[in-house]
Amino acid sequence: MSKSSLRSFPGDRPESRSDFRAAFDRSPVATFLFDDATRACLEANKAAELLTAFSRAELLDRRIEDLHTREHRDRTLKYFQRFRHEPGFTYDDLKLETKDGRVVPVYVRVITEERLLQCEVLFQNHKLTTLNALSSAIRNSMELHQILSGSLRVIMEASGSV
């Protein structure tokens, strides 16, 4: 799996991934994406780089437990397992260790469901845009308009409603 781009989700389009990447990087909240099987950092935004003092490339070489202080690493692994099995689980009692040795309190939560919902919203938006374009094309079609007008007139005459 490539560490150089955000993970793909079903229904993703390239433009939605680039939109997500831009929003991800603009977020003022330090955000990390970890692989649930390997615990490896797959992505980190600009705020995460500022918080930890690690570059994005350095963050992508770390696992979740590597970012926490040594005394909290065992608990970090236990919490990570809970993330995998308990949707909505969060923690705020562990400390993150920065590149320069500072210790920072963190609040951790899983955003997988939020990401899947975002993909669904983007997909529904795409469908609405397509329907709008189709209805606009139909409305602008003179041939179809004339055919429908003629058909309506025949129906109205046949029903005696002219």
Image: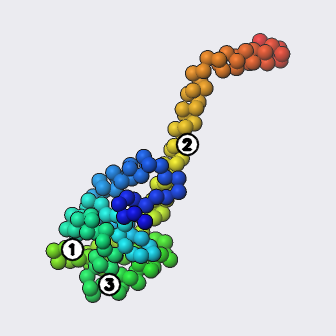
For numbered disc 3, what is the local secondary structure? helix
Residue that protrudes farthest toward the front in the picture:
2
**Mark drawn on residue 127:** 2
Q: Amino acid at mark 1?
A: Thr
* Kind of residue at disc 2: Lys
Label annotation for residue 73: 3
Residue farthest along the left direction in this orientation: 100
Q: Is residue 20 above or below residue 154?
A: below
Q: CA distance from mark 2 to mark 3?
A: 45 Å
**Residue 135, horizontal then vertical, whole percent:** 59, 30
Can see residue 151?
yes
Q: Secondary structure at mark 1?
A: loop
Above-or-below relation of 46 to 155: below
Sequence-wise, the earlier of marks 1 and 3 is 3
Quadrant location of residue 143? Answer: top right
For marks 2 and 3 on the same chain, the one whose residue lies earlier in the sequence:
3
Q: Residues within 10 Å of mark 1 (few under 14, many from 20)?
A: some
Q: Report how far apart the C-alphas of labels 1 and 3 lie in the structure.
A: 14 Å
In this rendering, the count of numbered labels is: 3
SS at circle 2:
helix
On the question of residue 156 being in view, the answer is no
Say which residue appears at 66% left-offset and 20% top-offset.
144
* In the image: residue 90, left or right of residue 11: left
Residue depicted at x 27% and y 64%: 56
Check disc 3: other Cα within 10 Å, few if <14, some if 14-19, many if 20+. some
At a point 23% along the width and 65% down the height, the residue shown is 55
In percent of the image, x 44 and y 49: which residue is there?
Answer: 14
Amino acid type at mark 3: Arg
Q: Which circle marks residue 152 in the picture?
A: none
